[in-house]
Image (cartoon, helix red, strand yellow):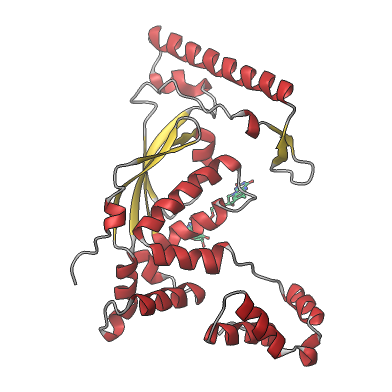
Amino acid sequence: MARVQVPEADAIVDQEFSVLDHGFVRLVDYLGGDARIVQAARVSYGGGTKTFRQDRGLINYLMRNRHTSPFEQVVLTFHAKMPVFVARQWVRHRTARLNEISGRYSVMEDQFYLPDSAHINAQSTTNRQGRDHDPLPPEVSGELRNELASEQRAAYERYEDKISRGLAREVARINLPLSLYTQWYWQIDLHNLFHFLELRLDPHAQYEIRAYAEVILDIARRVAPLACEAFEEHRRKAVSLSGRELDAVRSLLGGAEGIDDAALRAAAEEAGLSGKAIERFVEKLRSGTQS
Ligand SMILES: Cc1cc2nc3c(=O)[nH]c(=O)nc-3n(C[C@H](O)[C@H](O)[C@H](O)COP(=O)(O)OP(=O)(O)OC[C@H]3O[C@@H](n4cnc5c(N)ncnc54)[C@H](O)[C@@H]3O)c2cc1C
Protein backbone atom coordinates (compact mmCIF):
# COMPACT_ATOMS: atom_id res chain seq x y z
CA MET A 1 0.00 0.00 0.00
CA ALA A 2 1.35 3.43 -0.97
CA ARG A 3 2.23 6.18 1.48
CA VAL A 4 -0.93 7.82 2.78
CA GLN A 5 -1.29 11.33 1.41
CA VAL A 6 -4.07 13.61 2.53
CA PRO A 7 -4.54 16.58 0.17
CA GLU A 8 -6.47 18.59 2.81
CA ALA A 9 -3.51 18.24 5.15
CA ASP A 10 -0.92 18.93 2.43
CA ALA A 11 -2.76 22.19 1.75
CA ILE A 12 -2.04 23.50 5.25
CA VAL A 13 1.44 22.09 5.91
CA ASP A 14 3.68 25.00 6.95
CA GLN A 15 0.77 27.38 7.38
CA GLU A 16 0.76 29.32 10.67
CA PHE A 17 -2.50 29.40 12.60
CA SER A 18 -2.51 32.27 15.08
CA VAL A 19 -3.25 31.61 18.73
CA LEU A 20 -3.49 34.29 21.48
CA ASP A 21 -1.61 37.53 20.73
CA HIS A 22 1.75 36.29 19.38
CA GLY A 23 1.44 32.51 19.33
CA PHE A 24 0.84 30.07 16.55
CA VAL A 25 0.58 26.42 15.64
CA ARG A 26 1.90 25.10 12.36
CA LEU A 27 1.73 21.56 11.02
CA VAL A 28 5.28 20.70 10.01
CA ASP A 29 4.59 17.19 8.78
CA TYR A 30 2.28 14.23 9.19
CA LEU A 31 2.50 10.48 8.75
CA GLY A 32 -0.65 8.59 7.83
CA GLY A 33 -4.29 9.60 8.09
CA ASP A 34 -7.66 7.85 8.32
CA ALA A 35 -6.53 5.41 5.63
CA ARG A 36 -3.52 4.35 7.73
CA ILE A 37 -5.73 3.70 10.77
CA VAL A 38 -7.97 1.51 8.64
CA GLN A 39 -5.01 -0.34 7.05
CA ALA A 40 -3.45 -0.95 10.46
CA ALA A 41 -6.70 -2.22 11.94
CA ARG A 42 -7.38 -4.51 9.01
CA VAL A 43 -3.82 -5.80 8.59
CA SER A 44 -4.63 -8.95 10.52
CA TYR A 45 -6.93 -10.16 7.77
CA GLY A 46 -5.40 -8.46 4.77
CA GLY A 47 -8.16 -6.00 3.89
CA GLY A 48 -7.36 -2.39 3.08
CA THR A 49 -9.57 0.64 2.71
CA LYS A 50 -13.13 -0.29 1.77
CA THR A 51 -15.96 2.14 1.22
CA PHE A 52 -16.00 5.49 3.02
CA ARG A 53 -19.01 4.29 5.05
CA GLN A 54 -17.26 1.09 6.13
CA ASP A 55 -14.08 2.98 7.01
CA ARG A 56 -16.05 5.45 9.09
CA GLY A 57 -17.81 2.54 10.83
CA LEU A 58 -14.51 0.82 11.59
CA ILE A 59 -12.89 3.97 12.95
CA ASN A 60 -15.93 4.59 15.15
CA TYR A 61 -15.79 1.01 16.35
CA LEU A 62 -12.10 1.37 17.27
CA MET A 63 -12.70 4.62 19.14
CA ARG A 64 -15.81 3.35 20.92
CA ASN A 65 -14.09 0.19 22.09
CA ARG A 66 -10.81 1.88 23.04
CA HIS A 67 -8.94 -0.18 20.47
CA THR A 68 -6.35 2.56 20.45
CA SER A 69 -3.22 1.22 18.79
CA PRO A 70 -4.28 1.84 15.15
CA PHE A 71 -4.51 5.55 16.02
CA GLU A 72 -0.87 5.42 17.09
CA GLN A 73 0.04 4.74 13.46
CA VAL A 74 -0.72 8.38 12.63
CA VAL A 75 1.93 10.88 13.71
CA LEU A 76 1.80 14.68 13.58
CA THR A 77 4.65 17.13 14.00
CA PHE A 78 3.79 20.69 15.02
CA HIS A 79 5.79 23.86 15.42
CA ALA A 80 4.11 25.89 18.14
CA LYS A 81 4.81 29.16 19.88
CA MET A 82 3.22 29.70 23.27
CA PRO A 83 3.73 31.56 26.57
CA VAL A 84 5.94 29.71 29.06
CA PHE A 85 3.03 29.10 31.47
CA VAL A 86 1.15 27.33 28.66
CA ALA A 87 4.27 25.33 27.81
CA ARG A 88 4.53 24.26 31.48
CA GLN A 89 1.06 22.68 31.26
CA TRP A 90 1.60 21.29 27.77
CA VAL A 91 4.89 19.60 28.62
CA ARG A 92 3.17 17.43 31.22
CA HIS A 93 2.01 15.27 28.33
CA ARG A 94 4.92 12.87 28.33
CA THR A 95 4.02 10.80 25.32
CA ALA A 96 5.27 13.39 22.83
CA ARG A 97 8.75 14.22 21.58
CA LEU A 98 9.85 17.83 21.64
CA ASN A 99 12.64 20.28 20.97
CA GLU A 100 12.39 23.71 22.54
CA ILE A 101 14.22 26.94 21.75
CA SER A 102 17.17 27.35 24.09
CA GLY A 103 17.38 30.46 26.23
CA ARG A 104 21.00 29.47 26.93
CA TYR A 105 21.87 29.54 23.25
CA SER A 106 19.66 32.36 21.92
CA VAL A 107 18.57 35.74 23.22
CA MET A 108 14.86 35.33 23.94
CA GLU A 109 12.54 37.41 21.77
CA ASP A 110 10.82 40.44 23.25
CA GLN A 111 7.38 38.86 23.13
CA PHE A 112 5.02 38.44 26.02
CA TYR A 113 1.45 37.31 26.31
CA LEU A 114 -0.89 40.09 27.34
CA PRO A 115 -4.44 38.82 27.89
CA ASP A 116 -7.16 40.87 26.27
CA SER A 117 -9.65 42.50 28.63
CA ALA A 118 -12.20 39.74 28.09
CA HIS A 119 -9.81 37.30 29.76
CA ILE A 120 -8.84 39.40 32.74
CA ASN A 121 -11.19 37.90 35.29
CA ALA A 122 -11.42 37.54 39.05
CA GLN A 123 -10.41 34.37 40.86
CA SER A 124 -13.24 31.85 40.60
CA THR A 125 -15.20 31.36 43.79
CA THR A 126 -16.29 27.84 42.82
CA ASN A 127 -13.09 26.43 41.28
CA ARG A 128 -9.84 26.96 43.15
CA GLN A 129 -7.80 26.58 39.97
CA GLY A 130 -9.86 28.74 37.64
CA ARG A 131 -11.11 32.22 36.93
CA ASP A 132 -14.62 33.62 36.90
CA HIS A 133 -16.54 33.49 33.69
CA ASP A 134 -17.15 37.25 33.46
CA PRO A 135 -14.29 39.70 33.06
CA LEU A 136 -13.60 42.29 35.75
CA PRO A 137 -15.13 45.78 35.27
CA PRO A 138 -13.39 47.53 32.33
CA GLU A 139 -11.68 50.19 34.49
CA VAL A 140 -10.15 47.48 36.71
CA SER A 141 -9.14 45.15 33.88
CA GLY A 142 -7.71 48.10 31.91
CA GLU A 143 -5.55 49.12 34.84
CA LEU A 144 -4.37 45.55 35.47
CA ARG A 145 -3.62 45.05 31.80
CA ASN A 146 -1.46 48.22 31.73
CA GLU A 147 0.35 47.00 34.82
CA LEU A 148 1.03 43.59 33.29
CA ALA A 149 2.36 45.26 30.13
CA SER A 150 4.69 47.64 31.96
CA GLU A 151 6.06 44.83 34.17
CA GLN A 152 6.79 42.81 31.03
CA ARG A 153 8.56 45.78 29.43
CA ALA A 154 10.63 46.37 32.55
CA ALA A 155 11.58 42.69 32.84
CA TYR A 156 12.75 42.60 29.22
CA GLU A 157 14.72 45.87 29.55
CA ARG A 158 16.50 44.45 32.60
CA TYR A 159 17.19 41.21 30.72
CA GLU A 160 18.71 43.13 27.77
CA ASP A 161 20.70 45.29 30.16
CA LYS A 162 22.23 42.25 31.88
CA ILE A 163 23.16 40.72 28.53
CA SER A 164 24.77 44.00 27.43
CA ARG A 165 26.81 43.95 30.65
CA GLY A 166 28.22 40.57 29.69
CA LEU A 167 26.09 38.25 31.82
CA ALA A 168 25.59 34.78 30.30
CA ARG A 169 22.23 34.36 28.57
CA GLU A 170 21.45 31.32 30.72
CA VAL A 171 21.64 33.48 33.84
CA ALA A 172 20.23 36.71 32.39
CA ARG A 173 16.96 34.92 31.56
CA ILE A 174 16.15 33.66 35.03
CA ASN A 175 13.97 36.62 36.00
CA LEU A 176 11.92 36.63 32.81
CA PRO A 177 8.21 36.09 33.51
CA LEU A 178 5.94 33.16 32.64
CA SER A 179 4.21 35.32 30.01
CA LEU A 180 7.34 35.20 27.80
CA TYR A 181 6.82 33.30 24.56
CA THR A 182 8.77 30.16 23.85
CA GLN A 183 8.52 27.77 20.92
CA TRP A 184 9.01 24.13 20.12
CA TYR A 185 8.66 21.32 17.68
CA TRP A 186 6.25 18.78 19.12
CA GLN A 187 5.61 15.36 17.67
CA ILE A 188 2.88 13.06 18.90
CA ASP A 189 0.81 10.16 17.63
CA LEU A 190 -2.91 10.55 17.17
CA HIS A 191 -3.93 8.33 20.09
CA ASN A 192 -1.90 10.39 22.54
CA LEU A 193 -2.96 13.61 20.82
CA PHE A 194 -6.58 12.69 21.53
CA HIS A 195 -5.68 12.18 25.19
CA PHE A 196 -4.05 15.63 25.23
CA LEU A 197 -7.06 17.16 23.48
CA GLU A 198 -9.57 15.50 25.78
CA LEU A 199 -7.85 17.04 28.80
CA ARG A 200 -6.96 20.38 27.30
CA LEU A 201 -10.22 21.11 25.47
CA ASP A 202 -12.14 20.51 28.64
CA PRO A 203 -13.70 23.66 30.13
CA HIS A 204 -11.65 23.00 33.31
CA ALA A 205 -8.41 23.51 31.41
CA GLN A 206 -7.01 27.03 31.39
CA TYR A 207 -8.39 29.24 28.60
CA GLU A 208 -4.97 29.86 27.05
CA ILE A 209 -4.05 26.18 26.55
CA ARG A 210 -7.60 25.48 25.38
CA ALA A 211 -7.05 28.04 22.63
CA TYR A 212 -4.08 25.95 21.40
CA ALA A 213 -5.99 22.69 21.74
CA GLU A 214 -8.83 24.06 19.56
CA VAL A 215 -6.40 25.00 16.79
CA ILE A 216 -4.58 21.66 17.03
CA LEU A 217 -7.88 19.80 16.75
CA ASP A 218 -8.74 21.83 13.63
CA ILE A 219 -5.39 20.86 12.12
CA ALA A 220 -5.80 17.20 13.10
CA ARG A 221 -9.20 17.23 11.37
CA ARG A 222 -7.38 17.97 8.11
CA VAL A 223 -5.13 14.95 8.61
CA ALA A 224 -7.63 12.40 9.91
CA PRO A 225 -11.20 13.76 9.67
CA LEU A 226 -12.97 10.47 10.44
CA ALA A 227 -10.81 9.78 13.49
CA CYS A 228 -11.45 13.31 14.75
CA GLU A 229 -15.17 12.91 14.17
CA ALA A 230 -15.08 9.67 16.21
CA PHE A 231 -13.04 11.42 18.92
CA GLU A 232 -15.64 14.20 19.16
CA GLU A 233 -18.50 11.72 19.39
CA HIS A 234 -17.03 9.10 21.72
CA ARG A 235 -14.59 11.09 23.81
CA ARG A 236 -15.06 14.86 23.72
CA LYS A 237 -18.84 15.00 23.86
CA ALA A 238 -19.22 11.78 25.86
CA VAL A 239 -19.28 11.52 29.65
CA SER A 240 -18.71 8.50 31.82
CA LEU A 241 -21.03 7.87 34.73
CA SER A 242 -19.99 6.37 38.05
CA GLY A 243 -21.84 3.25 39.21
CA ARG A 244 -24.13 5.22 41.49
CA GLU A 245 -24.75 7.92 38.89
CA LEU A 246 -25.85 5.21 36.49
CA ASP A 247 -28.12 3.77 39.19
CA ALA A 248 -29.69 7.21 39.57
CA VAL A 249 -30.35 7.46 35.82
CA ARG A 250 -31.84 3.96 35.82
CA SER A 251 -34.05 4.82 38.73
CA LEU A 252 -35.27 7.94 36.89
CA LEU A 253 -36.15 5.68 33.98
CA GLY A 254 -38.27 3.49 36.24
CA GLY A 255 -35.70 0.99 37.61
CA ALA A 256 -34.46 -2.23 36.02
CA GLU A 257 -37.96 -3.61 35.60
CA GLY A 258 -39.58 -0.38 34.53
CA ILE A 259 -37.23 0.70 31.72
CA ASP A 260 -39.33 1.30 28.65
CA ASP A 261 -37.19 -0.02 25.77
CA ALA A 262 -39.51 1.41 23.14
CA ALA A 263 -39.30 4.90 24.64
CA LEU A 264 -35.49 4.59 24.86
CA ARG A 265 -35.28 3.53 21.22
CA ALA A 266 -37.49 6.44 20.16
CA ALA A 267 -35.34 8.91 22.15
CA ALA A 268 -32.17 7.44 20.66
CA GLU A 269 -33.56 7.78 17.15
CA GLU A 270 -34.56 11.35 17.89
CA ALA A 271 -30.92 12.02 18.92
CA GLY A 272 -29.71 10.70 15.55
CA LEU A 273 -28.70 7.14 16.49
CA SER A 274 -29.65 4.26 14.23
CA GLY A 275 -29.37 0.48 13.88
CA LYS A 276 -26.98 -1.25 16.28
CA ALA A 277 -26.12 2.03 17.97
CA ILE A 278 -29.67 2.16 19.33
CA GLU A 279 -29.40 -1.39 20.71
CA ARG A 280 -26.05 -0.56 22.31
CA PHE A 281 -27.64 2.45 23.99
CA VAL A 282 -30.53 0.39 25.37
CA GLU A 283 -28.10 -2.30 26.57
CA LYS A 284 -25.87 0.26 28.30
CA LEU A 285 -28.76 1.66 30.30
CA ARG A 286 -30.16 -1.77 31.06
CA SER A 287 -26.99 -3.62 32.12
CA GLY A 288 -24.37 -0.90 32.38
CA THR A 289 -22.16 -2.82 29.97
CA GLN A 290 -20.54 -1.61 26.82
CA SER A 291 -20.99 -3.82 23.77
C1 LIG B 1 -7.39 20.74 34.18
C2 LIG B 1 -6.05 20.18 34.63
C3 LIG B 1 -5.50 20.59 35.82
C4 LIG B 1 -4.27 20.07 36.23
N1 LIG B 1 -3.72 20.51 37.42
C5 LIG B 1 -2.50 20.06 37.81
C6 LIG B 1 -1.88 20.51 39.02
O1 LIG B 1 -2.46 21.30 39.75
N2 LIG B 1 -0.65 20.04 39.33
C7 LIG B 1 0.01 19.14 38.56
O2 LIG B 1 1.13 18.75 38.88
N3 LIG B 1 -0.54 18.70 37.40
C8 LIG B 1 -1.76 19.13 37.01
N4 LIG B 1 -2.30 18.69 35.82
C9 LIG B 1 -1.52 17.76 34.98
C10 LIG B 1 -2.05 16.33 35.09
O3 LIG B 1 -1.91 15.79 36.38
C11 LIG B 1 -1.29 15.42 34.08
O4 LIG B 1 0.07 15.40 34.41
C12 LIG B 1 -1.42 15.93 32.66
O5 LIG B 1 -2.77 16.19 32.35
C13 LIG B 1 -0.88 14.86 31.69
O6 LIG B 1 -1.73 13.75 31.75
P1 LIG B 1 -1.21 12.28 31.51
O7 LIG B 1 -0.13 11.92 32.47
O8 LIG B 1 -2.42 11.39 31.47
O9 LIG B 1 -0.64 12.44 30.01
P2 LIG B 1 0.62 11.82 29.29
O10 LIG B 1 1.88 12.19 29.99
O11 LIG B 1 0.47 12.23 27.87
O12 LIG B 1 0.46 10.30 29.41
C14 LIG B 1 -0.59 9.61 28.75
C15 LIG B 1 -0.80 8.30 29.48
O13 LIG B 1 0.39 7.51 29.33
C16 LIG B 1 0.71 6.87 30.54
N5 LIG B 1 2.07 7.29 30.94
C17 LIG B 1 2.85 8.21 30.31
N6 LIG B 1 4.04 8.29 30.90
C18 LIG B 1 4.03 7.41 31.91
C19 LIG B 1 4.97 7.02 32.89
N7 LIG B 1 6.19 7.54 32.94
N8 LIG B 1 4.60 6.10 33.77
C20 LIG B 1 3.38 5.53 33.74
N9 LIG B 1 2.44 5.84 32.84
C21 LIG B 1 2.76 6.78 31.94
C22 LIG B 1 -0.36 7.23 31.55
O14 LIG B 1 -1.35 6.25 31.52
C23 LIG B 1 -0.96 8.49 30.98
O15 LIG B 1 -2.33 8.68 31.32
C24 LIG B 1 -3.56 19.15 35.41
C25 LIG B 1 -4.13 18.76 34.19
C26 LIG B 1 -5.35 19.24 33.80
C27 LIG B 1 -5.93 18.80 32.48
The picture quadrant where one finds residue 261 is bottom right
Seen at 45% across and 18% down, the residue is: 172
The picture quadrant where one finds residue 286 is bottom right
Which residue is nearer to you in this view: 30 or 229?
Answer: 229
Answer with the quadrant where ligand 1 appears in the image: bottom right
Which residue is nearer to you in this view: 128 or 120?
Answer: 120
**Residue 129 locus on image (x, y percent):** 69, 43
In the image: residue 235, left or right of residue 193 = right
In the image: residue 229, left or right of residue 142 = left
In the image: residue 10, left or right of residue 258 = left
Q: Quadrant of the C terminus?
A: bottom right
Outermost residue, bottom side: 257
Seen at 81% across and 79% down, the residue is: 252
Seen at 56% across and 55% down, the residue is: 199
Outermost residue, left side: 2
Seen at 37% across and 30% down, the residue is: 102
* Residue 18 in view in this figure: yes
**Residue 134 locus on image (x, y percent):** 72, 38
In the image: residue 179, left or right of residue 16 = right
**Residue 204 locus on image (x, y percent):** 65, 50
Q: Quadrant of the N terminus?
A: bottom left
Against 217, is 123 above or below? above
* Residue 288 in view in this figure: no
**Residue 115 locus on image (x, y percent):** 58, 30
Which residue is nearer to you in this view: 20 or 188?
Answer: 20
Q: For the image shown, how many numbered marks are present on the structure?
A: 0
